[in-house]
Image (cartoon, rainbow, N blue to C red):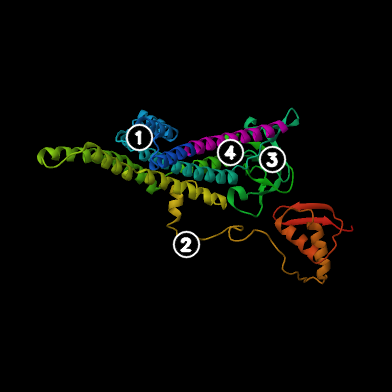
Amino acid sequence: MGHCSCCAHECASEKEVEVKIFIFQEYWKAGLSFILLISGIIMNALGSSFFHKEYVALIWYMVAYLPVGFPVMKEAWESMKEKDYFSEFTLMIVATIGAFYIGEYPEGVAVMLFYTIGELFQDKAVDKAKRNIGALLDIRPEKALVLRDNGLITESPKNVKVGEIIEIKSGERVPLDGVMLNEVAAFNTAALTGESVPRNIREGEEVLAGMIVTDKVIRIKVTRPFDKSALARILELVQNASERKAPAELFIRKFARIYTPIVIGLAVLTVIFPFVYSFIDTQFAFVFNDWLYRALVFLVISCPCALVVSIPLGYFGGIGAASRLGILFKGGNYLDAITKINTVVFDKTGTLTQGTFEVKECKSASGIKEKELIKLVASVESNSTHPIAKAIVNYAKLQNVELLPVTGTREFAGFGLEAMING
């Protein structure tokens, strides 16, 4: 089993290293582009003789453009292969190439650089949200004790087949869905239901992955494979929450598909109309580069990137922030729906309370002294894992009551305990 755990941790570490390398590469590209852009602007402002040569400035800004421009070109090409010709990537490329054509090199680089910086902030926000969701949900055990050949074998839950019997010790998390084989046992179901008070599950009833056995060693018969367990389905739902779009997200996607071609058309008309008008009014001087510049400015200003990116990012960030606080949203549509709620009715211990019990006072009505009653009850409850039992034992400690040795403890599910004290 040690090998399974090591492999899992090694894989996780490798993924973290890959993510860090990718982030470093993206920041490095943006940093290089920024340094070249600023230094080019400074050299131009200072009237450097070296930089006043046209081909030097072009090469300089091309080198500044490529680190941030190439990834966008790649995205535009991928979009075109999917027959999405009018994406925000296409707008950015048209605008920046046009800027280079009319000699506005710094502006061409700046547009792409600012877009890349915006993307880096977006990636950082999404990555943080995913980590929050993963930290809350990825509580699946990495091992399972399987009964094979009359012995218990440690196995990865992924390799356990339906119909096999697995054993779970007290305090361990159930790795797979199954049917209870023991007479009765108490389970902490907080990870699945939010209910903090242990639930008793009897023989033949369903036990779900993610529950924690609280009182004894149990055995269950597996009914579902690892990737079909209740916990796996919840994990998948929340991790893919961004696929369930809120109405605002769906609208902005449809809007962008119509809006983007219209913007490109208007930019083209910004150049064509003055050109046509120059034939009608001979006094009107049409300068192609001037009107192309205005068209490109319009194109960049009208780019729907902010709308297309910010709305889905807002929902995903909201899901991640809620996960950090222990609240699961299985889609942006549910996050949207909760904003319309005006009344909430709570019916679960642990939702509005901590789910921890505390004895306020003890009263005896049977003639026995209160201290003696506390001593007897706390002694019997001392080996129980039930929250009320723990509260009674803690109360006895606060009252400085010494517990007595107990023998023959028996538990009656739903009723209480029976034990022998001093015969």
Task: Name the side, left or right, on which 230 lies relative to 148.
Answer: left
**Residue under the point 44% across and 44% down:** 118
Question: Does residue 224 appear anywhere in the picture?
Answer: no
- Three-letter code for the amino acid on which mark 4 is drawn: Ser
Q: Which mark is residue 343?
A: 2
The quadrant of the image that shows the N terminus is top right
Q: Which mark is residue 181?
A: 3
Residue span colored magenta: 1-30
Q: For the residue carrying disc 1, how many other residues have a C-alpha within 10 Å: few (<14), some (14-19), or many (20+)?
A: some
Q: Is residue 324 above or below residue 225?
A: below
On whether residue 16 falls in the magenta region, the answer is yes
- The image quadrant of residue 72 is top left
Camera-side residue: 69 or 205? 69
Give the residue at mark 1.
93
Q: Nearer the viewer, mark 2 or mark 3?
A: 2
Give the residue at mark 4.
229
On whether residue 19 falls in the magenta region, the answer is yes
Q: For the residue carrying disc 4, how many other residues have a C-alpha within 10 Å: few (<14), some (14-19), or many (20+)?
A: many
Measured Cα–Cα span from mark 3 to mark 1: 64 Å
Which one is earlier in the sequence, the residue at label 3 or at label 1? 1
Which one is earlier in the sequence, the residue at label 3 or at label 4? 3
Q: Main secondary structure of the magenta part?
A: helix
Residue 390 placement (x, y as % from top left): 74, 58
